[in-house]
Image (cartoon, grey):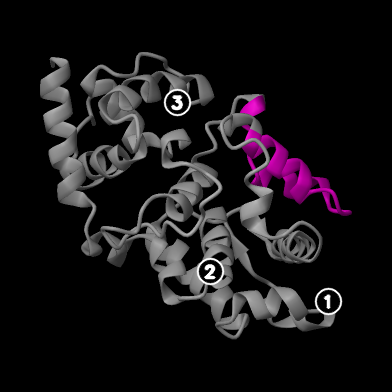
Amino acid sequence: MKHSELSDFLNEKAEYYETLDFIESDPIQIPHLFSKKEDIEIAGFLASTIAWGQRPTIIRNATFIMENMDMAPYDFISNFKEEDLTSFEGFKHRTFNFEDLKHFFFSLQNLYQNHGGLENAFSQTPENMALNISKFKELFFEIPHRSRTQKHVSDPMKGSASKRLNMYLRWMVRSDQKGVDFGIWKKLSPANLYLPLDVHTGNVSKKLGILKRKQSDWKALEEIMTTLRKLDPNDPVKFDFALFGLGVFEGFGKDA
């Protein structure tokens, strides 16, 4: 496919899939329950953290977390004490369990009390997203924690494609013009974001010839982003809607 053909094709698909209908079956519906910036970013962070597996299960478990925070994530994070966490005991989503969730709560509390919140924590090196995410992880785990919990925050500097964190950053940073993403973070530019690389977006990228690498790691992500940034230097991650939609809803790329 020629460059102009690829551009027309992906722009058309991005336009088609980035609609309010997208929210109905996607974990992004969880932060859409809220209107306050801090509530949105906390709800989004927790929902994206468990965003692997079946989407109905992700949404159900994320809703459980929100309901047990009394549908007031920022107020809960600001004021909770360990004895307030009994309603979460027994929580489990895949390998993410109550002990992991408890640490996430305490780490979020630390970020808001001592580091200016999630946006500041994710904006340490805004033009180098791999390093930026890595520095966020370092800050997130500066308080005492169980070593097992670290696996639930990925690190691009160790090769991870960081799918869930890149998805979360898309939610927070991209424009809210279409009503799907939020655009509430201003310290990061949409131009510097990275695609949430998963099996669907990876297979479609291979089918389109914009990914040759076999491993689904940060180097594969860089390979895809080289093309996407040429197609739209200011908002390359809008094509996530195209690649994901093609893979999930149209079965495009299954034979890649």
| Disc 2: which residue | 37
Give the mark nearer the N terminus: 2 vs 3. Answer: 2
Disc 2 to disc 1, how far (Cα)?
A: 25 Å
- Who is closer to the viewer here, 37 or 61? 37
Is residue 133 part of the magenta span, yes or no? yes
In the image, residue 44 above or below residue 134: below
In this picture, residue 172 sits left or right of residue 224: right
In this picture, residue 216 sits left or right of residue 250: right
Between marks 1 and 3 in the image, the one whose residue lies nearer the viewer: 3
Amino acid under label 3?
A: Leu
Disc 1 to disc 3, how far (Cα)?
A: 39 Å
Is residue 211 part of the magenta span, yes or no? no
Image location of residue 221, percent across then percent down: 45, 26
Q: Residue at x 46, y 37 (%)?
A: 193
Q: Quadrant of the C terminus?
A: top left
Q: Quadrant of residue 183?
A: bottom left
In this picture, residue 30 sits left or right of residue 146: left
Amino acid under label 1?
A: Glu
Q: Quadrant of residue 67?
A: bottom right
| Disc 1: which residue | 82
Indicate the secondary structure of the residue bearing disc 3: helix
| Disc 3: which residue | 221
Between marks 2 and 1 in the image, the one whose residue lies nearer the viewer: 2
Neighbour tally class for label 3: few under 14, some 14-19, many 20 plus, Cα within 10 Å: many
* Residue range highlighted in magenta: 132-157
Image location of residue 152, percent across then percent down: 65, 47
